[in-house]
Image: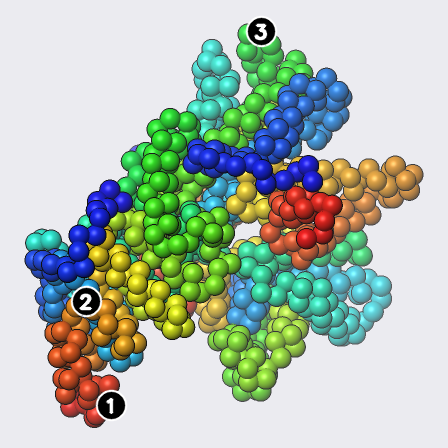
Amino acid sequence: MTQVAPASASTKSIGEVLLKIEDVSLSFGAVHALSEVGFEVRDREILAIIGPNGAGKTTMLNVLSGWYGPDQGGIVFKGVRRRRLRPHEAATLGIARTFQNVALFKRMTTLDNIMTGRHLKMRTNFLDHALYWGRAEREEIAHRETVERIIDFLEIEAIRKVPVGRLPYGLQKRVELARALAAEPTLLLLDEPMAGMNSEEKEDMCRYILDVNDEFGTTMALIEHDMGVVMDISDRVVVLDYGRKIADGPPDRVRADPAVIAAYLGVAHADA
Amino acid sequence: MDILGALLLKPFADIGGSPLFFLEVVIGGVLTGVMYSLVALGFVLIFKASGVFNFAQGVMVLFSALTLVGLMELGVPIWLALIATILVMIALAFAIERLVLRPLVNQAEITLFMATIGLTFFLEGFGELLWGANVKKLDIGIPDRSFDVGGILVNEFELFAAGIAALLVAVLAVLFQRTKIGRALRAVADDHQAALSVGISLTSIWVIVWAVAGIVALVAGVMWGGKSGVQFSLSLIALKSLPVLILGGLTSVPGAIVGGLVIGVGEKIAEVYWGPYIGGAIENWFAYMIAVAFLLFRPQGLFGERIIERV
Amino acid sequence: MFYRESGHFRTTYRADQAIFPIVQDRWSVAAIAVVAVVAVPWIANEYWLQAILIPTVIFALAAIGLNILTGYAGQLSLGTGGFMAVGAYATYKLTTFLPEINILVMILVSGFFAAAVGILFGIPSLRIKGFYLAVATLAAQFFLVWIFNRVPWFYNYTSNGMITAPPRTLFGVALTGPHASAEVRYLVCLAFLIVFAYLAKNLVRSATGRSWMAIRDMDVAAEIIGIRPLRTKLLAFAISSYYCGVAGALYMFMYLQSVETLAFDVNVSFLVLFMIIIGGLGSIMGSIIGAAFIVLMPILLTNVPRLLSVQIPVELAKHGEQMIFGGLIIFFLIVEPLGLTRLWQIAKEKLRLWPFPH
């Protein structure tokens, strides 16, 4: 990571709007996965997206990472409005993500997985790679150094050469975070980074998320079900329910919002 | 320009010039298509129930027909030979389940696929070792002659074969939809884990589908062998069921049937009208080309379920 | 005890990224290469070279090609025979059209024709996967063989439809044709294998190889990282077909010397697929081991009874061989689905600890 700077202070300054989602709607057949959802993500912020199962959280992330194109609405990223992003466009713009059910390259080693995260930073082509000596090797070593720094940072040195398919779930989640970080993203999308973890692993993961945000200034949007975690680490919370945004604000205020409480406790909906 | 004319205009002129003959070609195609459907059907059964891409389906056609003819040559009456062959195919299903499928359970798809290629080699060698490799005549008492229906020549044997195939499909449909075994089969096809958890025995289901596929192969083998003799090329013709499968979708029974008909008719028309202009023998690859061209527009096949990729 | 990793400290990333990071491995591979290049042509007789070594080396090259596509990029292909045919016929046309240009150059050029055809038939891979793609590649196999069979231009209108390697030389040494010695042909093929195996190893250990494996293991995640699926898959098809094309050209010019399209039929595709499965998917070394195994097996099956002086009727031997071949394939898949290279790795792990069990 070239922009690694010593953590200035724990008081961070949340900056300008980095990403603006403008009334995004998306339906699959008759299912309205998202209905006119709009919110903003500010620079250096940790935004949590919460909501009951089937609320459209993952769909939102899929729109942001370019997997789905919205039926309506648009995405403004770094001041440029787009109707939809293509996956590689999103990646080129500096959006990286992790997946709900770990999407690692199972038969590749931890090291190779993270190196793959640097794909878009690589400048050599396949002819360089075939010859290896020279350009390709120099580039490989340069990127290896960056990757090793991330490995150090996430404390996964010992599993460098282990195929990730053999790792326990908690470590896989960490490798996936490492792979996303390797792309040096401006915006990092985390889909349930703590799902299926015990409380100790959760604490570790929280620490890593806060450290990444702090040290690299990475903006994050994360989906999480554990309310304790959400209240602890996020600067702001967006609540989705049945594909609609029902609340948006600082954690404390969202927690007290009657609409949010109703959604979680299952008060009958009056929707169409 | 000549070649373009030959490819784009002449065949259509030929078709328009003699619509009755065209109809004959189409009917001939339908009847061949039915045979493709039969082989493809056995294949779909196995793929649905065990997720195995059974490359050996073609050689099972050859093996069953060889066994039947071999027994008949030994002087066994046809009905007894049929029963014996069915028993052999059931025994084969047991052996395959025991010796190939069970030890390879939970392996990657490609490993199982490779195993069925190994099985293909094995069965080919085994069948010819037992019964010899020369062409055998299979006479099941249906004359291979054509008769005239309103000016169109229809082959009696092919018509009979189509009838049998239709009957078999109907029987299988009933088996699938109306019986307890059928329900278990559909459950396994849907979700192995869930089926296991409600007490369906996977191994017995596998034996059943492989046995049924073996019997379907036997029917196909009898039909084809009766038409053109039982010989090695039978397993090559059966390879044609592969484009049928990708056209129809690997898991769809109606797909296998419709796909077989489409390929049968398409191939016949292409061979009769286009073949002469581009060197002939195009039926070797034409079916594959139809299937590939089709897949570019509808990757899931005719009746396959649309795959929405979730992340 | 003698073979171990401990004590070898790799202090640079460069050393850590070497092809054979362990000293003993480096030496043994170098030793094998020296033996193959220097000693084998001296020792081996005509039969060994022609029946075993030359086909092994050529098939190893084709297997590396298929392994790039199937083992690394995860795209199952049954069209290997067809792509090999493209290389063979392209070389034939090129060298009969421009006889003054060296045959080795033409073999290398013919690979590009195979690559182009590979790209063409790889296009469906964007939309279809797995077995559907496998069947689509069969289309390539049947179509290519058909076209080389049916269009007389490809075989220069010879009356029997066969193509025969014309005599070609390099610095006065006959490389192809009736006067080319088995030693020369073996060394030419071996040179191709060593160079191309090295290039392939480099490809798969760098970013190109990682993008292939990423597509193979989890295409969705790969795409979101910014790997373009079509470009990556087509590159795999192109390089794989290039390798197969060169192998096909060698197969025709250095091994069979006179072929018809039957030499490239669908069985060749299966044979090469067997090689990579038995050798090990996603392993360059495994491709070579698998090729040796598949070439040797039928020879052993014919010769073992002869050595034991057991008389077997020809028919029985032929079908028996087929059965044993099929049975052995199944047996190997059951015993070690990851291939011979995995067995080799396990042996190495044991050796590392020897004489202690754990």
**Please, is residue B239 above or below residue C267 in the view?**
below
Tell me residue C80's x, y (percent).
52, 41
* Mark 3 crowdedness (10 Å alpha carbons): few <14, some 14-19, many ≥20: few
Horizontal relation, residue C19 to residue C332: left or right: left
Q: Mark 3 and mark 1, same subunit?
A: no
Which residue corresponds to mark 1?
A266
Q: Nearer the viewer, mark 3 or mark 2?
A: 2
* Mark 1 crowdedness (10 Å alpha carbons): few <14, some 14-19, many ≥20: few
Q: At numbered mark 2, what does the secondary structure look like: helix, strand or loop?
A: strand
On residue A39, which mark appears?
Answer: none
Which residue corresponds to mark 3?
C172
Gap between marks 3 and 1 measured at Cα? 89 Å
Q: Amino acid at mark 2?
A: Leu
Gap between marks 1 and 2 measured at Cα? 24 Å
Q: Quadrant of the C terminus of chain B?
A: bottom left
Q: Write down the quadrant of residue C305 in the picture.
A: top right
Gap between marks 3 and 2 measured at Cα? 74 Å
Q: At numbered mark 1, what does the secondary structure look like: helix, strand or loop?
A: loop
Q: Write down the quadrant of residue C335 in the picture.
A: bottom right
Q: Amino acid at mark 3?
A: Gly
Q: Nearer the viewer, mark 1 or mark 2?
A: 2
Which residue corresponds to mark 2?
A47
Horizontal relation, residue C217 to residue A117: left or right: right
Tell me residue B303's x, y (percent).
41, 69
Q: Nearer the viewer, mark 3 or mark 1?
A: 1
